[in-house]
Amino acid sequence: MGIVLDTDQLTGIGLALGLGLLVGIQRGWALRGMAQGTRFAGIRTYGLLGLAGGIAGTLYLPAPGPALVVLAASAALVVLGYRRTSEADNRISGTGSIVALITIASGFVVAAGDRLIGTAIAVSVVLLLSLRGKLHGLVSSLSESEVMAIARFAVIALVILPLLPDRGYGPYLAWNPRQLWTVVVLVSGFSFAGYFGARLLGPARGILATAAAGSMVSSTAVTASVANRMKQDTSEPAVLAAAISIASAVMFCRVLLLVALLAPFALEAFARLVAAGMAVSLATSAWFLHRAPRGEAHPRQDMPVRNPFDLGPAILLTALVMVFTLAARWVLAQYGDRGLAAVLAISGTIDVDSAIITMGSLPGGTLTPEVAGSVLAVPVTLNTLFKAGISLSVARTKGWNGAWPLLLAAGAVVISWAVFG
């Protein structure tokens, strides 16, 4: 029986060819300075490799033998081409050959039916290749301690986390090792992203970029640091006030993301309550930046960001989560939903993340989405008021510019509560 190609299969083969050409365009541009005949492969070769993978993917189910022959022959040609190029240039670079093999694989995957996965693979390769200069520059600028920190984060996120059991232990089965370690991974991950985000943006962005990056870890710590600077420095009040509002806006974004990841059932109700507070924080940030003199947008110094590779804060937060999770389970068993709201409100005043993580660790169906959203809005509101108090207590009257936007944001959440609660 012959092999009959339908429209869907032809589309898969065409997509495989297109992805190969996409990779080839990037490789051709990157190697445009090399003389003809000295390159490992060009746009046509990569296009043909993608097409070969697509043909193999289409043939695999009806005719696996010919499909494997096409794959093996294509891979063999890539290996031979790598050997010839490395011997001629007397240098070793496996990028071209590895990219060629991945191009074959992505063509195979899209033609076999998994088009989204195959396309994502090819596009990711092109993006990674396009970032070559920036990645090399970043690697060159890394210190030994930063490289060790990256390795530590990989260990805690990719090695330790999957090995931990995913079930409850201890009193009330309140402690789930995998969920608790996820706290460490999340806190370290936010800190990790904030640190390198600030590095990539550079010191010229000043306190605004640093405040935004730092508030990915703790907007409370950022507010205290900015308030301390308000007390000592009067040359840039509008930018400092904008930094506090930006930190508050990032906090709202961060808690929405955490709720989406850890307690998705409460996301819709929670978002209705806190969206107005985030809008107020963004609006006051824009207002202060508009008022700032042109030269004030780049302060003389950067606000220091907490060491992102210190696991101490993550471990401390995990310990607090253990305590408050156990307390929440006990209060829930003794007093019901009202008692639980009090526990989460108290725990979230200083650190909103712990309240969200505690909510996410409760058994499914414990609270309705509406109740859960309202319960989580309480610590967010109290934390915002707490930061306003920090601004006033640290900077005294100079901290009013940082405090009143926070009071407005908290008031917006309260009003949303009255309307939607």
Image (cartoon, rainbow, N blue to C red):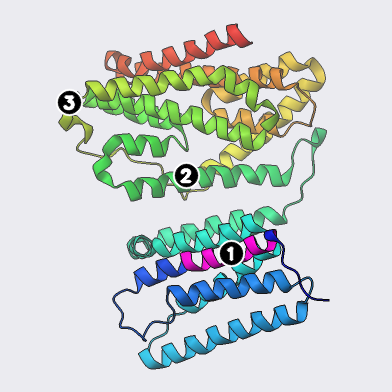
Horizontal side of 153 relative to 177 (left or right) equals left
Q: Nearer the viewer, residue 268 or 40?
A: 40
Count of all numbered marks drawn on residues in the image: 3
Tag 2 residue: 191
Magenta stretch: residue 401 in it?
Answer: no
Question: What residue type is disc 2 on?
Answer: Ser
Horizontal side of 42 relative to 12 (left or right) equals left
Give the Cα distance between marks 3 and 2: 31 Å
Tag 1 residue: 14
Q: Nearer the viewer, residue 78 or 6?
A: 6
Residue 126 visible in the picture = yes
Circle 1: is it few (<14), some (14-19), or many (20+) Cα within 10 Å? some
Give the Cα distance between marks 1 and 3: 55 Å
Tell me which numbered mark, 1 or 3, is placed earlier along the sequence: 1
The picture places residue 233, in percent across and down from the top left corner, at 21, 26
Element on which disc 3 rests = loop
Q: Nearer the viewer, residue 75 or 259?
A: 75
Identify the image quadrant of residue 114.
bottom right
Q: Which residues are magenta?
A: 8-22
Element on which disc 1 rests = helix
Question: What residue type is disc 3 on?
Answer: Pro
Mark nearest the camera among 3 and 2 is 3
Horizontal side of 173 relative to 236 (left or right) equals right
Q: Nearer the viewer, residue 341 or 204?
A: 204
